[in-house]
């Protein structure tokens, strides 16, 4: 009886290893198409899209460094990842240079986010808690994009030349700690705390005197935000994941995964991501119906050299979404690191 149990355990372990290898294969193949797209479009991708690729760059470099030397298949996959890193390094240099030339002021404000060393890849994992989900949520966004950008530059120290970093105003703290916010407001609140941590800001909550928040830590806010972002993703899938809501679905996976919440790396969610990729050009969020319309708009933009590139979204000439593509490849890089960590028993996620 014991021998049968051991054989069953061995078979299950082998099946798990094969399944994991197949998942990593799928992710690497998708990322290769995503890097193909960047190589062709590096001059046109907006800042948000480039940041997503920079996150991928950090994730791939970590993956290559920590890749388990378990078997020839795994080592072959690592070799593919090494090639991707080299290609990504070259393409991102060109993309960042294009941002510097096309929109120098905006580039200066967010320059720290455009280096892979800024982004910290999770070394340990935790899970969300659905008991933290808001009892009610606002029906519209509760953040202002311009104010959000200003709050981030105050953290980064780029609000002026040689500006002091880690500045938290009451207006910024109140917006970034407000409960009940939906969709992009949630992801921006989370990013605010993540970027503050990665910039080395020691206490983002200093000066908050609200009695109801006295025991709240930065980690508490991150868990609350990601627990609500988990609920958002579950609702989006229940209602049907379409082109209009796929972007926030992907953004939630990217930022909460990067924050160390392993339950965002679900296998069935990965399949949804892979299906969103356009196999022809390698991007995400491609809308062929807007191609001819965007040609006219892009030509108009080229005639206006001081036109500010919209950070939230940019639809490229081929109908591809700059933002969604960057977010998707960043999320896929997170999947890669998570599945590699699963192979190392010392790095398995917390239950």
Image (cartoon, rainbow, N blue to C red):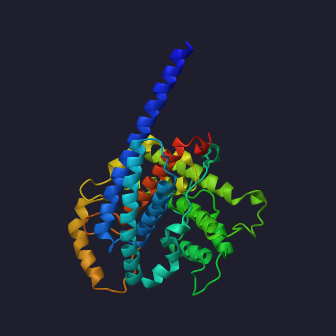
Whether residue 245 is visible: no
Depth check: give the residue in front, 232 or 91.
91
Quadrant containing the N terminus is top right
Residue 300 percent location from the top left of the image: 26, 81
Residue 60, image quadrant: bottom left
Residue 96 percent location from the top left of the image: 41, 75
Depth check: give the residue in front, 50 or 297.
50
> Image point 41% across, 36% down: which residue?
18
Residue 175, image quadrant: bottom right
Residue 243 vertical placement versus 115 (above, below): above
Residue 105 percent location from the top left of the image: 47, 84
Extreme residue in the left direction: 292
> Image point 48% across, 60% down: which residue?
61
Left or right: where 181 falls relative to 106: right
Depth check: give the residue in front, 287 or 200.
200
Residue 116 vertical placement versus 11 (above, below): below
Left or right: where 71 falls relative to 221: left
């Amino acid at each position: 009886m014991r021998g049968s149990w051991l054989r069953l355990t061995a078979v299950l372990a082998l099946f798990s290893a094969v399944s994991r290898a197949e998942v990593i294969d799928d992710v690497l193949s998708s990322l290769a198409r995503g890097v193909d797209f960047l190589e062709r479009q590096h001059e046109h991708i907006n800042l948000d899209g480039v940041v997503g690729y920079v996150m991928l760059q950090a994730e791939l470099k970590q993956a290559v460094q920590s890749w388990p030397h378990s078997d020839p298949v795994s080592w072959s996959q690592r070799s593919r990842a090494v090639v991707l890193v080299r290609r990504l390094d070259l393409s991102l240099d060109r993309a960042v240079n294009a941002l510097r030339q096309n929109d120098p002021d905006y580039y200066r404000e967010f320059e720290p986010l455009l280096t892979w060393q800024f982004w910290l890849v999770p070394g340990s994992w935790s899970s969300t808690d659905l008991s933290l989900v808001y009892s009610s949520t606002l029906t519209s966004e509760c953040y202002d994009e311009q104010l959000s950008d200003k709050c981030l530059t105050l953290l980064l120290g780029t609000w002026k030349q040689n500006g002091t970093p880690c500045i938290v105003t009451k207006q910024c703290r109140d917006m970034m700690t407000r409960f009940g916010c939906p969709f992009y407001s949630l992801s921006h609140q989370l990013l605010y705390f993540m970027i503050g941590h990665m910039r080395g800001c020691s206490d983002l909550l200093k000066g908050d005197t609200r009695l109801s928040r006295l025991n709240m830590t930065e980690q508490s806010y991150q868990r609350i935000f990601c627990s609500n972002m988990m609920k958002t993703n579950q609702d989006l899938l229940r209602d049907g994941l379409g082109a209009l809501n796929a972007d926030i679905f992907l953004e939630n996976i990217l930022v909460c995964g990067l924050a160390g919440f392993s339950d965002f790396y679900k296998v069935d969610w990965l399949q949804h991501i892979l299906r969103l990729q356009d196999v022809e050009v390698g991007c995400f969020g491609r809308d062929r119906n807007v191609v001819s319309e965007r040609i006219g708009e892009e030509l108009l933009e080229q005639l206006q050299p001081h036109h500010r590139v919209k950070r939230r979204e940019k639809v490229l000439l081929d109908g591809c979404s700059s933002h969604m593509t960057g977010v998707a490849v960043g999320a896929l890089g997170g999947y890669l690191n998570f599945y590699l960590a699963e192979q190392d028993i010392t790095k398995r996620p917390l239950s």
